[in-house]
Image: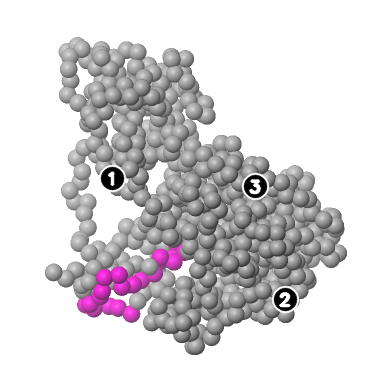
Amino acid sequence: MIRSLLVANRAEIARRVFRTCRDLGIATVAVHSDADAGAPHAGEADAAVRLPGDAPADTYLRGDLLVEAALATGADAVHPGYGFLSEHADFARAVRGAGLVWVGPPPEAMEAMASKTRAKEIMRKAGVPLLDPIDPAEVTAGDLPVLVKAAAGGGGRGMRVVRELDALPAELDSARAEAASAFGDGEIFVEPYMEGARHVEVQVLADIHGTVWTLGTRDCSLQRRHQKVIEEAPAPGLDGELRRTLAESAANAARAIGYEGAGTVEFLVSPAGRAYFLEMNTRLQVEHPVTEEIHGLDLVALQLRIAEGEPLDPEPPAARGHAVEARLYAEDPARDWRPQTGVLHRLEVAGLRVDAGPTDGDVIGVHYDPMLAKVIAVAPTRAEAVRRLAHGLERARIHGPVTNRELLVRALRHPEFEAAHMDTGFLERHLPELTAVASDDDEAARLAALAAALADAARRPATTTVAGRLGGWRNVPSQPQLRSYRAEPDGTEHEVRYRLTRDGLLAEDFPEVRLLSAEPGRGTAAGWGTETRRGTEPTPGAEPKPGAGPRPVTGPGPGVAPGQAATPARVVLDVAGVRRTFEVTAYGDRRYVDTPRGCHVFTALPRFPDPTARTEPGSLLAPMPGTVVRVAEVKAGDRVEAGQPLLWLEAMKMEHRVTAPAAGVLTALHATPGHQVEVGALLAVVTAEE
């Protein structure tokens, strides 16, 4: 029996395993880097062990330190989670060699699947259908497009789609370099790239007594940079014969390597409905919750029971309903999926399952994956599950770094996705429309900016003075109030001009807008799905505690006529006869305006901008904190072309290419490999040609 378990991982998956351990009465041990010292997973465990350092190579990838931590805390077993060392056979051997239970497959099975090239050879012998590889030296124009892939690792790293023969040598070199950096193994291979294919996988569970379960299918076709974004179970639109082929192939794959525990066999399904083996992940998958929800299972609990030697039932429970999962990332899809950092002030999604890593007030740094949470909806039908997930994400309170929330909502509501017509190129193909500013977004943003201005006015304390001013409002016409806001992340500026008089709100550009009472019990509802917390007037200029909710106050703010009640936290407007509620939260100069149809984020702009806050034309600034991993073979004084790669930054497990903005001369280059840079750091300067 396992009585104490160490999770050799962090964030969401560590918290997920701890949750099951608490249900089963198993004590828990966390490990944490210095960057994660205050992370939720470290605080939720019964014991926590520090791994000195911040970088994964110094902490979560140090198998020796993880085994020492397990022994020092008296743990019986180690669960690897996913990522990091979860598929490293040598780590599994070290755990077993220390007399601990390894919650995972045998090391030999892990080794068999560790190299994608070796895995394909084994699968071929087992009769599992697969694509034939192509010798990189023999690729012809007729073979295009092709996919260059790293033989080790996963997560889309070391993977390139090549559509032009001339680009192949450079992409091979780039993939080798990224694979060597990420996995310590630069081996790559080439195979045909299947246009219009779907990514479908089968969850398997196998015990030590020879029973193998296949738990239906999952569709994971919606991907960015070959990493999954939206997953669902069961995979829609597959006929009975294809489902049987997938299940039999997955079971044969597991039996061929003597598999034990939880694993996933991944396939490409062609537009013609043929399945081809991709790889086998010898661990728990990020998207396992959708399988749990429709089968009524706890896969982590089953992993633990299999590790303890318990047998599975002869057959798994049947699936019921449909489940969809969306990965909420701290990234900006409109800017090349650029990862984002900063304080996550608030993360609140009502009515859905949320498996999250960080909590309110946590800092999202540069060292790890940008995934904040997985949001899962389940319903009797696919249409209902998709609708519930989109609705829940749209109304979620997410205050902090820019996220992909809007893209998720639009993708879930896209006609092709609703009709289950998707493939691995879906997000790339539809990215412009999924990130574009919609025709009605501008008016919605301007209304939200007006609400932010009224909330800011209510935040300022009222005063009583001469000249007819009483309680902050005037009995004579006044000059308009002026506030300016910059919408984030697109940078659109909104100038708000309004007056609050005895007769009510007079807002320029909004002649049909009236200010209503925002006070509960004064003719309006308390809100939409939230509780209004009443409190005292905050100290002027004080910032709320990170993660804390808004603090509405009673009584009108300055310039508010009697009977009106905009508060620092809530503004209710009558827009041409339709009442709309805006929940406003301020953190420093940031304003988050939540509505039932989404959130608007603004930066309050100073009345007198600093004229010195400019950069030299052609300056290339670091778009994020990160590490310079490679620099092109260029030097100051060289001529460069527009779009020419100059250097590569790594942040949050992703590489980002920094290119020349225009043709010209590279007049300065400040980056060197291994150099840590902060956001906004000057990397290079390109002086454009006339």
Where in the figure is residue 320, as x and y percent of width and height? Answer: 71, 46
Q: Earlier in the sequence, mark 3 or mark 1?
A: 3
User: Disc 1 vs disc 2: which is toward the camera?
Assistant: 2
Where in the figure is residue 690, as x and y percent of width and height? Answer: 13, 69
Q: Which residue is mark 3?
A: 322
Q: Is residue 592 left or right of residue 113?
A: left
Q: Are the residues flagged by discs 3 and 1 in contact, CB closer than 8 Å?
A: no
Residue 217 image-quadrant placement: bottom right
Q: Report the residue at 77% width, 54% height from top.
A: 302
Label 3 SS? strand
In whole angstroms, how far apart are the C-alphas of marks 2 and 3? Answer: 31 Å
Q: Mark 1: which amino acid?
A: Thr
Assess disc 1: are there few (<14), some (14-19) or many (≥20) residues with their C-alpha within 10 Å of its C-alpha. Answer: few
In whole angstroms, how far apart are the C-alphas of marks 1 and 2? Answer: 57 Å
Height in image: 170 above or below 611? below
Where in the figure is residue 530, as x and y percent of width and height? Answer: 51, 29
Q: Earlier in the sequence, mark 2 or mark 3?
A: 2
Q: Earlier in the sequence, mark 1 or mark 2?
A: 2
Q: Mark 3: which amino acid?
A: His
Label 2 SS? loop
Height in image: 4 above or below 101? above
Where in the figure is residue 592, as x and y percent of width and height? Answer: 39, 37
Camera-side residue: 45 or 215?
215
Q: Indicate yes or no whether the magenta region holds residue 635.
A: yes
Q: Which residue is mark 1?
A: 492
Q: Is residue 296 left or right of residue 173?
A: right
User: Which residues make up the magenta segment?
Assistant: 633-656
Q: Indicate yes or no whether the magenta region holds residue 167.
A: no
Q: Mark 2: which amino acid?
A: Gly
Q: Which mark is residue 127?
A: 2
